Each structure stands twice: as C-alpha cells, then as structure tokens.
Image (cartoon, rainbow, N blue to C red):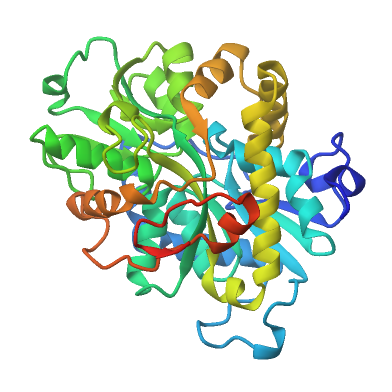
C-alpha cells in the first residue's frame, strides 16, 4: 500500500495535492457587506427553511457535480467498486482538526489511492447537510444535530454516521458583566447557524434555565444565528452579549474580545450516557447512504485515513500539532490562529473515533425541545462496521445501528 507521503507530500496544501480540489461553499469574489444583528437572524432562518438549497446548488455548480441518485437507485454492478471521486466537506474550526490534519498530511488521499479527492469548506452544519442531500458532496465532517435532523427528515434514507472525530470544545461565552443565567433575560446571543449543534445546545440549555426562545429570534433571549467570524466582530462592537461557539471561536472571544465563560458544555455531560464524563460529540464523520452503498471500499478508505489522522493528533508533540493545524486553518479559513488561541482550543477538545452514540437520544430530544427537529426513531443512524474493522476496537452504536 502506498503511504500518504508517496502521493501527497506534506509540503503541499490540500488543493495542491494531485487530484484534489477545494471549494469554499458560498464563496464570492464580491466584497461582503457587514450584517447587523437583525439581518443575521433572518439569514439564520432562511438557512434552515430554504437557503441551504441555494448553498447546495451553488456548491454543485462550482464543483461540476451531478445531482445524487435517490436511495434505492444504485447500480448493483457498481456496488463495491472504488469511486472515481470522493467529495468531502469540513469546517475551518479546530474541532475539525481530524479533517484538517487528514487533508494536509495526506492521510485521507493516501488511503483513497486512485480515487480523486475534492473538498469543500462550510461554516456550519445545516449548509453542509443541504449540500450532501443535494448530491454536491458525498461525505462530511459535521456536528451531530444537523446529521440527526437530516436522518429524521429523510426517514433514515439520507446519511449514516460512520465515525466520531472530536468531543468537547464548545462554550457559552459572554460579556464580563453577565455572571449568571439570570442576567441573560432580554440579551442577544449568537450561534453559528440555526439548527446547528451549538445552536441546539444553546436553546436546550436556555430552556433548562426557564427561558423561551423561538427560531425567528424572538423570546426571552434573542438568538442570532451568525457566521463565526462575524460573531467575533459583532461582539467586539458591542452588538452581541455572548455566543455558544465551537473552538477556536470560543477561545478567540475570550482571548481577543474580553469574553468570559458562562457555560462550558463539558460540565453538562456527566458520562452517564456515554461512559465518558465531560465528553459529548462535537464533530462526527457522515456519508451519503447511496454513495456508501455503491462504494463501500471508498468509504472504508476514508475511514482509514480519518483514523490515521485522529491517531496522529493524539500522539503528535504539542508544537507540531499546533503548527500543522494552524497551517491547515490558514488554507481553509484564510488565517492562522495566535499561539494562545490554538493552545487554549486544543486543551478543550478530545479527538476520538468513538461517536459517543449513547448521547444521541438526548441530542435528538434537545433538537425537539429547541424546535429545530421532530421527535422520531433514529434507529439505524449509525453504521460503525467499517470503523470497527479498521481500528480493531468496538465502538458502540448504542442500539442505534450496526457495529
């Protein structure tokens, strides 16, 4: 078997590697106008209701990708054959370090062999899900709640969760004068996108504090779905009171904008559901079910590269880990992080291939309580067979799929 280095020298960026292209979802060469808080709320609503379709269409157009086949339309003769191309989505966040490292160090491309690897960068989960469901991508790193929502809406036909990637690394950070939940009434908070994992976590937690929130931004506490980079700017400008964010954005608000941590999400998970106190799924790896049925060998190769990336993250020296992630972030998001930001971010994250399946019934209920998904049976959402074959371990599907 060829090593990743044989096909993808470490000195190359993902898009420089042979057979690999990168597109940023929604990217435009036109200058962006700053958006106010009210516009951010509307944008978040549109992203959930219909905007994602436009994102998926734009991505498909940029990538020249055909629409996905519907479930059940697979060509039996193609089953098991390596795909000609794998289109992979991920975010420019430290919580997506397995993707960042797997691409920049060539672990994923090396395992894919002759299969072309194309990548697309997203800001948040709902947009990535829309792209995957529209056939613009075949697999993506994503938070659990958008994956659950897709599975529910498609009655189990859209996606399979094939591995975990990162646990932890999400916090509610607020202005220093806010010292308790009681101070949040009438305040405006941000989340990356309506229906995303941090958005659901924020709404669910506010509900436990006696607050009502609505998806249109109204309620006891206003929630403004906003792109992460814009959240930092709005917070610095005094237009937001706080935000529930993944890393590195929580650390950026703390270290660069004077925010304080009101809630560290790890404190809300006692381990009773997963057996691992303080761990909750932040990033997972999912695949389109039709693609997986047609190209199981390609999916297994993706998982092999992913597992190598997670292993590297858990064994690399701290300095090398930080510098590798930073270089990949510059490629994905356009800028590196300051040393203190990436150091704080990495301290808050556990990289693991275990998807922590025992937490998913609660995550579903949180989405129901938040008003972003419907109550449903999510049995079958996991397919961990290939993961367990690759690792030789026994990641549990917690009765919600195959293992």
Tally of numbered discs? 0
Q: Nearer the viewer, residue 384 or 265?
A: 384
x then y, percent, for residue 9: 88, 40
Whether residue 59 appears in this view of the structure is yes
Q: Is residue 203 left or right of residue 52?
A: left
Q: Residue furthest left?
A: 210
Answer above or below: position of 387 versus 359: below
Q: Residue at x 32, y 30 (%)?
A: 265
Q: Residue furthest right?
A: 6
Q: Residue at x 74, y 77 (%)?
A: 81
Q: Nearer the viewer, residue 61 or 340?
A: 340
Query: Would you identify the image quadrant in which residue 67 lies?
Result: bottom right
x then y, percent, for residue 187: 19, 27
Q: Is residue 193 left or right of residue 182?
A: right
x then y, percent, for residue 329: 65, 32
Answer above or below: position of 235 versus 110: above
Query: Would you identify the image quadrant in which residue 300 lies?
Result: bottom right
Q: Residue at x 67, y 56 (%)?
A: 302
Q: Residue at x 21, y 63 (%)?
A: 375
Whether residue 29 appears in this view of the structure is no
Answer above or below: position of 332 versus 262: below
x then y, percent, for residue 381: 40, 64
Q: Is residue 403 left or right of residue 199?
A: right
């Amino acid at each position: 078997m060829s090593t990743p280095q044989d096909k993808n020298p470490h000195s190359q960026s993902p898009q420089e590697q042979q057979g690999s292209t990168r597109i940023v979802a929604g990217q435009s060469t036109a200058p962006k106008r700053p958006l106010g808080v009210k516009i951010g709320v509307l944008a978040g609503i549109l992203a959930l209701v219909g905007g994602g379709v436009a994102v998926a269409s734009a991505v498909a157009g940029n990538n020249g990708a055909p629409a996905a086949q519907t479930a059940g339309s697979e060509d039996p003769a193609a089953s098991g054959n390596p795909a000609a191309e794998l289109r992979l989505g991920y975010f420019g966040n430290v919580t997506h370090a397995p993707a960042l490292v797997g691409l920049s160090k060539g672990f994923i491309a090396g395992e894919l062999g002759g299969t072309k690897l194309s990548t697309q960068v997203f800001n948040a989960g709902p947009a990535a899900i829309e792209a995957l469901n529209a056939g613009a991508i075949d697999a993506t790193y994503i938070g659990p709640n958008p994956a659950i929502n897709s599975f529910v809406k498609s009655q189990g036909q859209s996606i399979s969760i094939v591995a975990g990637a990162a646990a932890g690394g999400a916090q509610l950070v607020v202005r220093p004068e806010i010292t308790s939940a009681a101070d949040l009434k009438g305040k405006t908070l941000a989340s990356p996108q309506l229906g995303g994992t941090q958005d659901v976590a924020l709404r669910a937690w506010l509900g436990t504090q006696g607050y009502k929130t609505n998806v249109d931004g109204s309620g006891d506490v206003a929630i403004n779905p906003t792109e992460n980079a814009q959240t930092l700017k709005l917070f610095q400008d005094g237009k937001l009171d706080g935000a529930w964010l993944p890393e590195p954005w929580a650390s950026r608000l703390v270290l660069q904008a004077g925010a304080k941590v009101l809630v560290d999400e790890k404190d809300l998970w006692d381990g009773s559901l997963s057996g691992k106190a303080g761990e909750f799924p932040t990033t997972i790896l999912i695949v389109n079910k039709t693609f997986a049925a047609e190209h199981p060998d390609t999916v297994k190769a993706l998982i092999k590269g992913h597992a190598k990336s997670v292993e590297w993250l858990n064994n690399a020296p701290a300095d090398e880990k930080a510098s590798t992630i930073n270089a990949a972030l510059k490629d994905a998001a356009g800028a590196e992080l300051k040393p203190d930001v990436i150091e704080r971010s990495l301290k808050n994250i556990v990289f693991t291939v275990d998807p922590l399946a025992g937490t998913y019934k609660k995550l579903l209920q949180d989405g129901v309580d938040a008003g972003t998904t419907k109550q449903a049976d999510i049995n079958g959402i996991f397919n961990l067979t290939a993961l367990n074959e690759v690792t030789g371990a026994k990641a549990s599907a917690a009765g919600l799929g195959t293992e």
